[in-house]
Amino acid sequence: MSTTQTLCRSSAAISRRGSQSSLHTENLPLQSLRPVSVSHPESSRRSSTGTASTDDTCVEPVAHTAIPSTHVAFPQNTTLRIVEWSPKDNTGRKYRRDIWYPKRESLPNFVEVEGMKCEFIKKDPPPGWIAYTCPEGKRLFHNEKKSAVTFTNIYDHDSWRAIESGIDRILARLEDYRQRNDHNIPCDVEICVTIANLESEPVLAYYLASMSLQSIFWLDKVDVEYLTDGERAVVSEEHLGLAAKYQFWNHVELFPCHQVLPRAAVQDLQAVFASGFCDLLTSNTSMFPWDLEKAEKLRECVRDIQPDQVDAHSTFIAARLLSTIYRERFLAFFGEYGARMDRKDSAFEKSIHRQRSWIFYCISPFLFFMPLVYMEEFEKLYVDDTIHYAFWRQFIGELKQDWERSITPVTVLISADVGFLAIGSIDNASSQSHNRNAAQILTYISAVLSLFVFIVCQILMRHHRHHICEQADRALNYVIKREKRLGLPAVAIAFSLPTALFIWSMLTFLAAMMTVFFDGTSSVTRIAISSVLLILLVMVALLLYLERDNTFSTPGSAYMRIYSQSKTKIISWRNTLWGWVWSWRGVGSAENDSCQV
């Protein structure tokens, strides 16, 4: 799915707590169905665009995690305790495989085809239910009379009885609310239920949805993370409404076969794509979740959406795109005073931003400050615990091109090293002694560095071979894994190795040549080589000065702080020294005047 995928680390580890009451007839305490750690459902959808964030790493379910299942052992009365969950959790139910089929025709009922059998009938579901197949191929069920939907296999008699019993209890609670007029309950409430396991106990998980309000809700009080999933702190009720809309359109995407798209929703989607496409064309830091290429293709899909009619495919397309848009808006604090309107802009407090270690600043000069350049790129891509897929793909693509282009000059440099060693005057004493002169040693070092450039490039290209075509959640997973191992600065250092090693290889080869040029040569040769070398060094120094941005001269960097502190110290020492000099001169002048008197 083309969607934003996000994590808030501080809240992702918090276990959801249930509401204050239970729908169960025995009024047992309601427990939350939400896990402490759960694999992100979007990652199972083959998401290819959008923004990913750190909550979408694929994590195996931990203990006390409710797992949707079609293989549940029911108690005899088939009355299951009812718990809450969200459409995002239901997505995991849709994409989770819990049924496996035989490789070949091994079932006894389907080993032969009867003669003249040309019609293949779909099995009828239980009374009141209609079986649909969603555009992606998953079977789902809809009860129009009770306005209920489920992915649970109700062809199983026990599952059907449990689902019906749970729906009836939920409808009774809704009717009780309507009679008491305690709440403004919409008339188009749809109940989504499924059977799941919670600590080996079969339960009935549910949520309510309304197309007229474009929202999901529950009968009892629940934690706000059921809507936000802990991805952002809620700053206003309007901000929370964006999360509710995202969850609602996620629900519509799951169950599109009977839904009727409102014309206003389709018009809003078309308008968002028009403005987003314009923003992409006119801004380099657009917050629109797709790049130009995909946005143009998706616009063609949006133009063909038909509103005010039952069309599973049109509804599926619109719901997937709208859920992405509202998720992006929620993450960017859309509509708030502090809305994030620039991809490089962070809406979080400055105090939580990553700090670079002194080890990183010590290593960077030896790698010609290339890690600083890559860290700047990472900080532009990885903002507020989210990563934008389109710009990540562009970044990795440019890296791969740089690594591939490094192979040819490295090969040429190795050939130059070998040719330099083959010169007779360089190796004239090798047959008499095992010692090597400085030129030979430097050439050996240059050749070894060049070989390691080739090795490093091959390793990096091998491990990033498919990253240019991967999905948003995998791009994020890549960053998170490496951040947990040694941190993003270590990744920046690794990306800097090909360029830095190649430069060191060239410098050592240059040093070897300079050793030959200045050892035992005439004054004319030395003066000529020195003049050319001096001019070239001045030009390189000028070039480095002009291109110093995003390296050691970045405002606020450790190097600039060291420079400022050193400058302040030097000025202070200079003033102190001049004070001593002037005071000494003043004392000496006074003594001379007294002697003259």
Image (cartoon, rainbow, N blue to C red):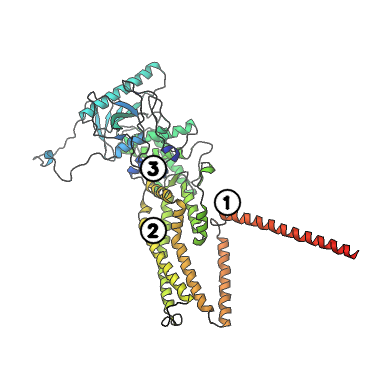
Residue 437 located left or right of residue 29: right
Query: Which residue bears the numbered disc 2?
Result: 460
Residue 369 located left or right of residue 181: right
Q: In which quadrant of the rendered image does the N terminus lie?
A: top left
- What is the number of the mark on residue 56? 3
Work out whether 438 lies above or below 156. Answer: below
Residue 234 located left or right of residue 88: right
- Say which element carries label 2: helix
Of marks 3 and 2, which one's residue comes earlier in the chain?
Answer: 3
Query: Can you give x and y, in whole percent of width and height, for residue 178 in the image?
Result: 38, 19
Query: Can you give x and y, in whole percent of width and height, for residue 592 in the image?
Result: 85, 64
Query: Can you give x and y, in whole percent of width and height, for residue 418 in the image?
Result: 41, 75
Q: Which residue is pictured at 48% across the width and 55% down the height?
A: 374
Alpha carbon of mark 1 to alpha carbon of mark 3: how far?
A: 32 Å
Kind of residue at badge 1 = Gly
Query: Which residue bears the numbered disc 1?
Result: 556
Work out whether 202 lies above or below 459. Answer: above
